[in-house]
Amino acid sequence: MPTGKEFLLLLLVLLPIFGEAATPGLPFFSRLRAENGLSHNKVNCILQDRRGFIWMGTEDGLNRYDGKNFVVFNSIPGDSLGLSGNIITGIAEDGDGVLWVATADGGLTAYDRRLPEAQQFKQFRHRDRDAGSLPENSIIRLAADEQGHLWLITAGQIVCRFDKATGNFDRADAAGAPGYIAGYFTDRRGNRWDGLPDRTLHYRAAGAGQEVVYRNAGGRRDAPEDMVGCFAEDGKGMIWMGGKYSGLYVYDRFVDKFRHYFQDPLQDGSLADNHVNCITIDRSGIVWIGTDKGVSFYNPLFEPFVRTFLPAGEKDVAVYDFYREDATGILWIATSDGLFMQKGEGARPVRRVGGEQGLPPDVVRFCRDTVGKRRAMALSALTEVHTIPDSEFYDARADGSGNFWISTYGSGLLFFDAHAKTISHIPASSNLTEGIQTDGRGNIWMICNGHLHKYDPLSHAYSCYDLPVTKRGGINGYIYKDNLGNLYTAGTNFFITFRPETVEAINMSPRVWFTDLRVFDKERGELLQQKEIVLQHDENAISFEYAAPDFSGDNISYSYQLARVDRDWIAGGKRTTASYSGLSPGEYVFQVRATNWKGCESNRVSSVRFAIRNPFWQSWWFCGLMGLFVALVCFGIYHYRIKEFLKRQAIRNRIALDLHDNIGSTLSSISIYSQVARVYLDQQEGGQLRELLARMDKTASLAVDEMSDMVWAINPKNDDMRSIVRRLEAYAAPLCAAKGIRFEFIHDPTVDKLNLEMSRRKNLYFIYKEAVNNAMKYSGCTLLEAGILVENNILRLVVKDNGRGFDLSSDRSEKRMSLSGNGLANMSRRAAEMNAAFTVNSQPGAGTSVELSFRVYN
């Protein structure tokens, strides 16, 4: 761990701390440029995050790379929801997984993918009159210490520390810091490396070791002849150094030598540019180099594959076969331009025999003859059970049990079981398979579509090694194995040698990470942080975005499945999205997996659990409430019907009682009168008989009136108040006219809008009729006033006369109040039936007032 001053030096030179790598003799550097999806060719900084994605800061935006696809983040002027600037000069990831991005044109930005879209980016800029803000918006270097603080240097050489807890930028004391150092690095053993502007490299061993100066002009011709600005250390302890103008240097401490790699336009796999801006080594050992003309990266997975170029000629040379002499170690190479010889590994091949010496180019068929014999042996064994078109058969190899592995140019890799006499196809194999070879472990190596493939019969694992030679068309033809177990394969103008046991296995099941989640095409990536996502019933169109960072080649293949929807795994190929719409409510599990070759299976599954809620009208509580509501409605209907039945029964009883009391008693009187009349007739009492007949006529008339009133009261056509008002006025007016009494009737027009049900209408009319009759018979009045009014939903019926009146406290006789027996007691009873207030006010000599009031509704 560097001291405070050493850490300050680290900031001044922007030195990232990296992981492991390996340094081959002649590494092949693959390239990524704008035509591959990079937002800009000038790359200033590179970082691998905790999920394995590679982040590249360019002169025009931030790039996330997963081995196949780029996702570009750009700054939009005036937009506070994105990057603060586009010229990316530094990237750091803190312990929380937040990405900190320094820019030269907009200050500092924090990017947290776990937050909602509108909150993912937080910008930090210079603010006037704020001492705790960023000193200036142009940042040239950025680093993070173990305490989680960010250290940065601005274009004005201001060193400051950003405290994430307070959000303040505190200026640091840079006194004594050697600003002339171009690059500074402390390796894992504690040794310090300094690159100076005078193109010297200073090395100081850990502790009080003596300083060593490497100077190209001082006799170390292999030493850097450039100003070293960036460093990295790989897993073997090799120190990778980036020069400002002359490319890349790698120091091997075991032999104390520097290797120099630079950009060569005529050489495939050379550095993209000699201006190296940054070096990063990821956790798998891949070396990433940012230059002014794109990214160069070297994958140590391909280190065992030693590539050798044939001497350049006027035309391209095709390599046919190989033969290695065991005694001398000389490798003979059969080509379209004659025979080449290589004396020892790493030696430059020398052309020995060719067409210009008078020998045909195909004179060297010693290797192809053996292929022909193998082919004949395989074909003879297969003719008994299977017919392979001669045009498809390419190569064959026997295993230790007498079985055959056969390559076909059209049907892929086949296996012939000599004991069972059966032939089977390897499903994962490429259809266009050329030469094949076995290694000491029983693996099958083959050439397919310009690449090198391997099949492990024991684990059934099939993998593809995308050798970085595709610019020259890849490899083709046959694979040769010498007695030492080395394998040889070739392409145009080159051949490749490797020992199979030194080749690392490809990660066949890379982990898949979810990069985004969209609901109806709206970004909802923050939901991925939840253990189980809960969506509403109308959020049933969902898209998953995912990626498996892998940089071994372009062979990643995805498959996915949504439980309850997909019966089996869906082959997604290289597509990194899966969309579903119209999902019904319920619980779901979306699963995705990746393999490094199509057709292979992986047990490493990434999943997201989510649930879509039922609409509230399908929820258990709503169904329960609706059931309760229906039950209450049914009960209410039942109760209402019972109540109506009882009410109708009560009305029938009331009608029967009224008919019995009124009509029955009247008819009984008539019957009695008729018997008396018969006696008077027998006695020839003419005067008394006439008087009795007149009384019978009057009684019958009263019975008719009673019946008419009863029929009117129960007729539903008379429910409206206009009919009631007319009936009230029509009853009293003739009676008053016959007796010479002035009658005044008043009613509120709003009364006409009301309706009264039958029992209230009947009781209202009979109370009114009783009050009018009493006034006619007993009051001796000259003026009778009647009125029906409504105030605040209270209906008031008033009958008032100016007669003699009476003393209510001393005279309660029903006989006095009514000859028919329906006196005050009957009126009070009827008022009680209709839940109405009934009052009688009278004083001797002051007349009588009868009032009925009850609540009504429109």
Image (cartoon, rainbow, N blue to C red):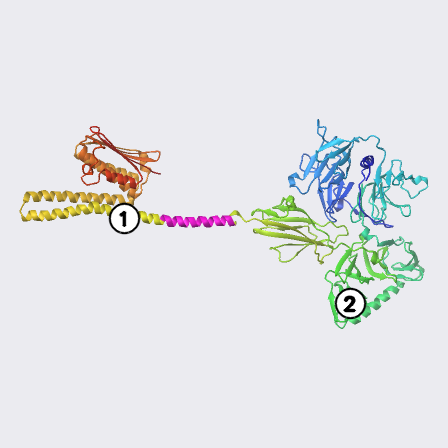
Q: On the image, numbered disc 2 is attached to which residue? A: 390
SS at badge 2: loop
Is disc 1 surrounded by few (<14), some (14 to 19) or many (20+) residues within 10 Å? few
Q: Position of residue 562 (x, y in %)?
A: 63, 54
Can I make out residue 776 in this image? yes
Can I make out residue 858 in this image? no
Q: On the image, numbered disc 1 is attached to which residue? A: 652
Q: Residue at x 93, y 43 (%)?
A: 221
SS at badge 1: helix
Q: Position of residue 184 (x, y in %)?
A: 84, 38
Residue furthest out toward the left:
684
Residue nearest the observer in this picture, 114 or 359 = 114
* Left or right of 579 on screen, residue 446: right
Specify whether residue 631 is painted magenta. Answer: yes
Is disc 2 surrounded by few (<14), some (14 to 19) or many (20+) residues within 10 Å? few
Image quarter hosting the N terminus:
top right
670 shown above or below 441: above
| Tag 2 near tag 1, CB within 8 Å | no
Q: Residue at x 91, y 46 (%)?
A: 256
Q: Position of residue 192 (x, y in %)?
A: 86, 40
Quadrant for residue 768, please give it.
Answer: top left
493 shown above or below 834: below
Range drawn in magenta: 620-640
